Image: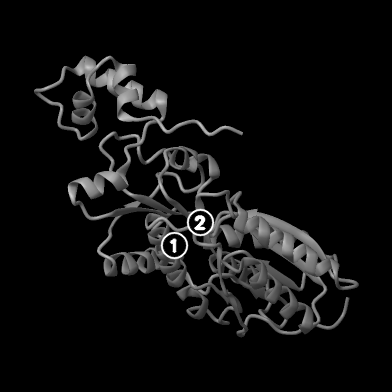
Amino acid sequence: MSIRPRPTSRDVAERAGVSQATVSLVLRDRWRGRVSPARVEAVRAAVAELGYRPNLAARSLRLGRARTALVVVPALTNEFFARMYAGAARVAAGEDVGVVLYVPPDERGPAPDPFASAGAAVDGVLASSMAAESLATLSQGGLPLVMLDSEPRGPGTATVNPDIADGTRQVARHLLGLGHRRFAHLAAEVDSWTFRVRARVLAEELAAVPGARLVAAERAPITVRGGLGAAERVLAGARGKAGPTALVCDDDLLAVGACKAARRLGLRVPEELSVTGFDDLTVATAVEPELTTVALPAEDLGAAGMHALLALLAGTSPATTVLPAALLPRASTAPPPPGP
C-alpha cells in the first residue's frame, strides 16, 4: 500500500495560483492589507482540498517557539476528565510545553476538526474518548497523536489506557464471590471502545459461572438522572419476576442514580440490591451507602499520555501503556437476599 506524500506549502501555492509567501501570510493570519480576500479564499480552499497541515515541529525549530500540545477532552464538567487534564498539564509545565485545551461542543458525537482555522499551530495532540472519524484529519496531517482510554490504533499513534477489562473483571468476580447470580447492567449511552470492553468482559465473566446471567441491560446518559431512569426501568420491569440482585454501572454517576431508584422503589442497598460504580469519583464516598467502585488513575493517565506525546515529538515510538485499575469494596455491595 503506497503512502500519499504529505502536501507542502508549495503544493498549496500551486493549487491556489499564488506565491508561497502569500500562503504563509494566510496561514499565519497576517494577510489583511496585504492579500486580497479572493486570494485568501483560494488559499483556504486549497488547504482544505489538499488536507494540508503545516510542519509545526520544523516551524518550532525555525522560529525558536516553545512546543504546544492540544489536549482534547469530551467535557470538563466531568471530574474524571478534569483530573486527567490536570495530570497532562502538570507534565507539560515541567517540560516547558504549552497546552491548548479543546472541548468538543457536543460530547456525545464526533468533534469537528480543531484545525479548521488555518492559524492553528500545535505540535501534537493528546485526545480522550473521541470517535475515530474525528481524528482522521489529525493523523493524516502528520501530527503526533496520543489516544487515552481508546482502542489501540495503528502505527504513528500511541495509546495510554487504564486497564478497563481488569477493572470490570474485578467487579464481576467480587459480586459473584458474594453469591450474586442475577445481574443487570446500566451501560453508558456512549458508543466507544471503553464501554464496549466493559459490556464484553461482564458477559464473559457471567458466562463462566453456572447459573449466573444478565437479566437486563439498559443504556443511559452518564448522569445521576440517567442512572435513576435506567434503574427504575430495570427494577420496575422485574416486579413479580426473578429480578437482578446486583446492578453493575458503567460510571459512579449512574450508580448514584441507581441507588436513588432503589430507595424510591422500597429496595434497601445493599441488603436487597447491590450496586457498583466505576471511576471512584468524589460522589462515590459522598453518598450513603458509599459505593463499591473501580478506581481509575485519571491524573496518572493524563500524565502518562503527555509523556508519550513528548516521546513522539522526540522521534521515538512509545509502546501501548496500560495503567492498573483497582476495585474498592465499600458498603453498597453485600451477599444477595435469600429466596428466589
Q: Amino acid at mark 1?
A: Ala
Residue 28 shows in the view: yes
Name, please, the residue furthest toward the right.
210
Q: Which residue shows up at 40% across the image and 63% down it?
A: 306
- Mark 2 near mark 1, Cβ–Cβ under 8 Å? yes
Name, please, the residue furthest toward the left.
33
**Total labels drawn:** 2
Answer with the quarter of the image where residue 174 lies.
bottom right
Give the image location of residue 133, x and y in percent. 53, 39
**Helix, strand, or loop for circle 2?**
strand
Give the image location of residue 115, x and y in percent. 35, 38
Q: Which residue shows up at 79% across the image and 69% down it?
A: 205
Marks 2 and 1, Cα distance to the nearest angstrom? 7 Å
Left/right placement of residue 223 relative to residue 124 reads right
Left/right placement of residue 117 relative to residue 300 reads left
Give the image location of residue 149, x and y in percent. 54, 60
Q: Which quadrant of the rendered structure holds the C terminus?
A: bottom right
Q: Amino acid at mark 2?
A: Ala
Q: Nearer the viewer, residue 154 or 247?
A: 154
**Helix, strand, or loop for circle 1?**
helix
337 versus 77 height, above or below: below
1 versus 171 height, above or below: above
Q: Which residue is label 2 attached to?
A: 158
Give the image location of residue 102, x and y in percent. 35, 50
114 versus 90 height, above or below: above
Q: Which quadrant of the rendered structure holds the N terminus?
A: top right
Q: Nearer the viewer, residue 40 or 59?
A: 59
Q: Which residue is label 1 attached to?
A: 308
| First reached walking from the N terminus: tag 2 or tag 1 | 2
Q: Which residue shows up at 21% across the image and 46% down it?
A: 62
